[in-house]
Image: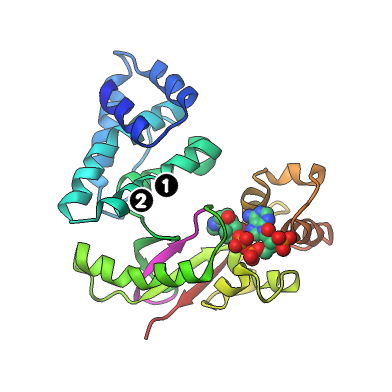
Amino acid sequence: MRETIVDAAEELDVPAPLLADALDYLTPRTEPLVAAQVAALEAAIGTTRTVAWPDDDERFQLLALLGTVPAARVWLAAHGVDDGIARASLGDLTPKLRDYGVAETGVDWLAKVVTCGVFSLGRLQFEPGEVVPGTATPAWNVHIPESGPLDPAACDASFAAAAPFFAAAFGDTTTRDFVCHSWLLDDQLAEYLPASSNILAFQRRFALVDTESADAPVDGATEGDRAVAKFVFRSPLAGLPALTPTTRLERAALAHLAAGRHWRERAGVLRRP
Ligand SMILES: CC(C)(COP(=O)(O)OP(=O)(O)OC[C@H]1O[C@@H](n2cnc3c(N)ncnc32)[C@H](O)[C@@H]1OP(=O)(O)O)[C@@H](O)C(=O)NCCC(=O)NCCS
């Protein structure tokens, strides 16, 4: 078990202190618990099931996530997934663990990655098993990793790659549409960013399918406010007043909140003909 975990950590470039800390947790008492969690994650590979976590210790969770990587690789290879796509998909763990750690990223997202529930096809990630909101129409959920500018041409290539990829690997020839749930689709961003911005170009691909009130404030903040704090400032919301904005988006984010307004997570759909 230890060797498998160390190998996976090396492959995924997991920061050494994070791995060392997790390995300290691996004792004859805890090893069977980790093995049981690995088995639960392995059983969920290729499904859209969310796996329950009996222990919320981040070290336990990291060990189980890493312990699942070999089975994920085998499953991806068995479906003929190109090695580059397999590496990129599992490789989503690398920046998330480096920049945020397990708890802040959210263990359910990391579990989705190691159970092959999300695929990196170039600039964007696609998660099968979604529907167009309010319908039973299947759709791919689009995710935008934090990996440099949201170049429109790179996005074009990713969207174009999705249908051929899912058809070849999983025989899915029925899904055609994309959905996205994100602060990046908040139409209020157009008040602040130029039309030429990559974020607004990305927004223009989607038709909003929810209402502004879908992300209403709870305890004074919306999901959108928290997402902007995390993805624009890598900070909890409470830390924002102490920060000095440098980019146009940073200035907009703070000015908007200072005016007593809220950011919103919005849902959009991109229908393919
Ligand atoms: C999505 C993302 C790649 C867009 O970046 P981009 O391609 O630079 O976007 P734009 O061209 O629209 O940028 C417009 C302005 O906002 C700034 N900006 C964009 N994203 C920013 C971010 N996350 N943090 C700080 N500033 C940002 C740009 O620097 C630019 O400012 P400038 O004119 O002063 O240089 C970027 O926001 C990002 O990495 N976000 C994190 C991932 C994420 O939010 N995923 C969705 C989770 S639901």
List the single residue furthest toward the top. Answer: 28
Q: Quadrant of residue 210?
A: bottom right
Whether residues under marks 1 and 2 lie with C-beta atoms below 8 angstroms apart, the answer is yes
Q: Which mark is residue 92?
A: 1
What amino acid does circle 2 point to?
A: Ser
Asked whether residue 112 is drawn in magenta, I would say no
Task: Determine the secondary structure under disc 2.
Answer: helix
Structural distance between the alpha carbons of marks 1 and 2 = 6 Å
User: Label 1 neighbourhood size at 10 Å, few (<14), some (14-19), many (20+)?
Assistant: many
For the residue pair 28 and 155, the one nearer the viewer reads as 155
Residue located 30% across and 74% down the image: 175
Amino acid type of disc 1? Answer: Asp
Dividing the image into 4 quarters, which one contains the N terminus? Answer: top left
Q: Quadrant of the C terminus?
A: bottom left
Query: Is residue 225 in sight in this rendering?
Result: no
Indicate which disc residue 273 carries: none
| For residue 150, side relative to residue 111 (left or right) | right
The residue stretch that appears in magenta: 134-145
Q: Describe the element under mark 1 as helix, strand or loop.
A: loop
* Residue 150 pos. (x, y %): 55, 63
Q: Which mark is residue 89?
A: 2
Ligand 1 found in image quarter: bottom right
User: Which residue does the image show at 77% across and 52% down from the upper left?
Assistant: 246
Residue 265, horizontal then vertical, whole percent: 59, 63
Residue 143: within the magenta?
Answer: yes
Residue 188 image position (x, y, % from top left): 70, 71
The reply, left or right, for residue 139 in relation to residue 83 is: right
